[in-house]
Image (tube, helix red, strand yellow):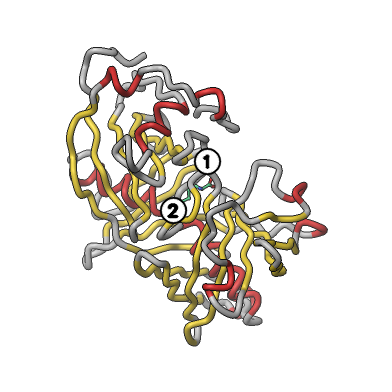
């Protein structure tokens, strides 16, 4: 449990403007309720962020576990931008053993390896995408009166990828798009809207499960790339050649590669912008909306 009187250190960072509160908690002492996470991520009454990264010491292949939470306090399996920002924090804190090689980081979706590039970017080995077959392969995304066919892509967390004529077509995205059949996504879904910008170059908007529309989504960029490769009739496995796409997001640019093995890598920036301490009494106070927030995955 956290000690209510002790200030709680935090940092703030972002990757292509997908922003995170980072809470170092090496010894796993803090019990951050969904309400406390939502309070921290609130852009008016809190620090403000799309999600939270709690840094916890792990045992096994990876020395550190990324406890990722969405802005509404719910848990998610994986966060692509988050894992780069998490790695940047470890590097800055002198905790990134394996620098010069690959640094393993544990997530709920399994271990992800990151590499610090000479140009300052961080590359993440995101694992292979899963492309569910059968009725779940093709889903329909609806916003208001408009609907689009979409592809179900799993990057450790669930995505529905819809190719659209214009990024403005989805409107202001104040609410989560409806995705059917709902049975394809029993835990909810992240939705990407995608347009072409040129050969092997796409741009997206994203509505994230648990966070709303954000300026970027790393797992979303990978899901989009994997869907675009198939839409474009490319087959890295059959050709025995990696394929790379540039994926523009509202907050910047990510470069995503699918290897012949199916392994996906994502390269992009990660920045720490501030650090400070949180008032623990504010953080741990009971909150009237607590009853409306639920976590849908196991805690670790
Ligand atoms: N922004 C993230 C994805 C965060 C999790 C997502 N909202 C979910 O619930 O699956 C990324 O960069 O991948």
User: x and y percent of residue 183 in the render?
Assistant: 77, 47
Residue 253 falls left or right of residue 196:
left
Residue 80 badge: 2
Q: CA gap, disc 1 to disc 2?
A: 11 Å
Badge 1 marks a residue whose secondary structure is loop
Q: Name the residue under label 1.
A: 76
User: x and y percent of residue 197 in the render?
Assistant: 48, 83
Residue 184 falls left or right of residue 157:
right
Q: Nearer the viewer, residue 135 or 103?
A: 135
Q: Which residue is drawn at 29% across and 54% down?
A: 101
Q: Nearer the viewer, residue 94 or 269?
A: 269
- Residue 92 occupies which quadrant of the picture? top left
Decide: few, some or many residues near mark 1? Use Cα within 10 Å; few <14, some 14-19, many ≥20.
Answer: many
Decide: few, some or many residues near mark 2? Use Cα within 10 Å; few <14, some 14-19, many ≥20.
Answer: many
Res. 86 visible in picture: yes
Residue 56 falls left or right of residue 172:
left
- Is ligand 1 closer than 8 angstroms to the Cβ of mark 1? yes
User: x and y percent of residue 300 in the render?
Assistant: 50, 29
Res. 261 visible in picture: no
């Amino acid at each position: 449990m956290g000690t209510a009187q002790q200030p709680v250190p935090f940092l703030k960072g972002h990757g292509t403007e997908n922003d995170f509160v980072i809470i170092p908690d090496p010894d796993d002492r803090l019990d951050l309720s969904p309400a406390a996470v939502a309070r921290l991520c609130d852009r008016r009454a809190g620090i403000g962020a799309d999600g939270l990264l709690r840094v916890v010491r792990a045992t096994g292949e990876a020395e550190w576990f990324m406890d990722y939470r969405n802005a509404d306090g719910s848990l998610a399996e994986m966060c692509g931008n988050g894992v780069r920002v998490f790695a940047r924090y470890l590097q800055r804190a002198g905790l990134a053993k394996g620098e010069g090689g690959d640094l393993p980081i544990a997530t709920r979706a399994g271990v992800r390896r990151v590499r610090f590039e000479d140009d300052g970017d961080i590359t993440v080995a995101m694992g292979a995408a899963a492309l569910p077959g059968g009725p779940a392969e093709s889903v329909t995304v609806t916003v208001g009166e408009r609907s689009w066919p979409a592809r179900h892509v799993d990057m450790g967390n669930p995505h529905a990828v819809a190719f659209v004529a214009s990024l403005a077509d989805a409107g202001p995205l104040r609410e989560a798009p409806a995705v059917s059949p709902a049975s394809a996504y029993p835990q909810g879904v992240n939705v990407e809207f995608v347009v072409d910008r040129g050969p092997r170059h796409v741009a997206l908007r994203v509505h994230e499960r648990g966070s709303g529309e954000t300026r970027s989504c790393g797992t979303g960029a990978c899901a989009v790339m994997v869907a675009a490769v198939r839409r474009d009739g490319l087959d890295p496995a059959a050709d025995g050649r990696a394929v790379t796409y540039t994926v523009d997001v509202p907050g910047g640019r990510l470069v995503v590669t699918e290897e012949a093995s199916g392994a996906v890598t994502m390269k992009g920036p990660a920045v720490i912008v501030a650090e400070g301490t949180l008032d623990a009494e504010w953080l741990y106070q009971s909150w009237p909306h607590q009853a409306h927030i639920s976590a849908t995955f196991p805690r670790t």
